[in-house]
C-alpha cells in the first residue's frame, strides 16, 4: 500500500499549490491513497469549512486530519460529526463532535487513519498515549494497516509517540510545527516515522503567516490578528510504502516550492 500524506494545508495558497502539483507528484509517487492534514485550510488559516473540504476532495485528497484548529469554524462542527472522511484528535473529550479514527478502502485492503494531539505546549487534553493504545486495540481487529497523525509541538513528544507505537502502527507522522524535519526513518518493528511533515502553503511567511506581524509580535509581545502571507508557495509531504502485512518498507520526504 502506497500512501501520500500532505502536511498542514494552509489557506488558499496551500490549496492552490496542491491543485497544481498533485497530478505531477502522483506520477513520481503513485499513491493508492492521499491523506492531508487540513486544520489550517480555511482562507484565514483557522480550521476548515465543509466547502473547503469539498475542494480538497475534488483535488484528490481522500481523508482529512485535524489538530488544535479543529473548532475554529463553527460551521464545521456538524460536518465533523457526519463526514466519515475526516478525523479530529482522538484524545479530545468523548462528547466532542467527530471521530478520532476512520477507515478508508484502499484496493482490497483497508487503511485506518487516526489523529492524536500532543500536550506539551499545546493544551489540556487527555493522554494521547492512552488514546493511541485504545485506538490501536480497536483498529487491529479490522486491519493491520494503520496511519496516525500526531499533531504536536515538541520533537521529544513526537519521538516518544513514534517509539511508543513502533511495531504497532504502520505509520506515525507528525504535524503542527509547519517546519519539515529531516528525521524520516523506519523505526524497529517497521513503523514509518517523521517528526514533522511540514506545511503546504505560503513559503515566505513565518509558518504561513505574514512575517512582519510575527516579527512585530516577538518584539513587542502585543496581540496581533494573523493574516496569511502571499507570494511563493511550498508543498510538504511524505510518501510511505507498506508491505502486505501492514509493516512499513520506506518513507520519503517531499518538498516542492513554486512561485
Ligand atoms: Fe496545529
Ligand atoms: Fe497547522
Image (cartoon, rainbow, N blue to C red):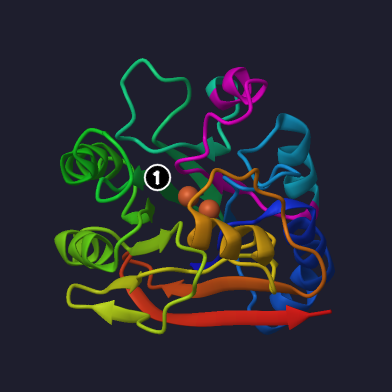
- State the quadrant of the C terminus: bottom right
**Can you say whether 252 is above or below 230 in the image?**
below
**Can you say whether 86 is above or below 76 in the image?**
below
- Which residue in the protein does label 1 denote? 115
Q: Quadrant of residue 128?
A: top left
Q: As rendered, which of 137 and 61 lies closer to the eye? A: 61
Name the residue located 29 percent from the left edge and 79 percent from the top edge: 186
Name the residue located 67 percent from the left edge and 64 percent from the top edge: 212
- Magenta residue span: 59-80
Name the residue located 55 percent from the left edge and 62 percent from the top edge: 7
Q: Residues within 10 Å of mark 1 (few under 14, many from 20)?
A: many
For residue 195: magenta?
no
Q: Secondary structure at mark 1?
A: strand
For residue 64: magenta?
yes
Q: Where does residue 201 sit, x and y in percent of width and height?
A: 69, 64
**Can you say whether 23 is above or below 65 in the image?**
below
Q: As rendered, which of 48 and 173 lies closer to the eye? A: 48
Q: Where does residue 111 sit, x and y in percent of width and height?
A: 45, 51
Amino acid at each position: 500500500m502506497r500512501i501520500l500524506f500532505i502536511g498542514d494545508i494552509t489557506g488558499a495558497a496551500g490549496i492552490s499549490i496542491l491543485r497544481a502539483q498533485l497530478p505531477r507528484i502522483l506520477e513520481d509517487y503513485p499513491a493508492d491513497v492521499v491523506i492531508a492534514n487540513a486544520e489550517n485550510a480555511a482562507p484565514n488559516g483557522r480550521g476548515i469549512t465543509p466547502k473547503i473540504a469539498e475542494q480538497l476532495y475534488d483535488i484528490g485528497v481522500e481523508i482529512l486530519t485535524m489538530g488544535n484548529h479543529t473548532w475554529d469554524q463553527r460551521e464545521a462542527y456538524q460536518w465533523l460529526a457526519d463526514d466519515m472522511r475526516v478525523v479530529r484528535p482522538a484524545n479530545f473529550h468523548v462528547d466532542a463532535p467527530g471521530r478520532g479514527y476512520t477507515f478508508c478502502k484502499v484496493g482490497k485492503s483497508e487503511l485506518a487513519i487516526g489523529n492524536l494531539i500532543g500536550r506539551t505546549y499545546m493544551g489540556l487534553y487527555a493522554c494521547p498515549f492512552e488514546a493511541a493504545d485504545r485506538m490501536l486495540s480497536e483498529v487491529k481487529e479490522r486491519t493491520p494497516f494503520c496511519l496516525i497523525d500526531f499533531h504536536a509541538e515538541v520533537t521529544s513528544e513526537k519521538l516518544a509517540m513514534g517509539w511508543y507505537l513502533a511495531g504497532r502502527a504502520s505509520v506515525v507522522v507528525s504535524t503542527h510545527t509547519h517546519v519539515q524535519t529531516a528525521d524520516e526513518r523506519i523505526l524497529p518493528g517497521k513503523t514509518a516515522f517523521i517528526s514533522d511533515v511540514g506545511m503546504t502553503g505560503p513559503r515566505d511567511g513565518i509558518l504561513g503567516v505574514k512575517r512582519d506581524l510575527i516579527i512585530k509580535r516577538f518584539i513587542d509581545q502585543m496581540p496581533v490578528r494573523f493574516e496569511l502571507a502571499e507570494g511563493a508557495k511550498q508543498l510538504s509531504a511524505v510518501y510511505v510504502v507498506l508491505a502486505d502485512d501492514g509493516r512499513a518498507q520506506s518513507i520519503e520526504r517531499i518538498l516542492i516550492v513554486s512561485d
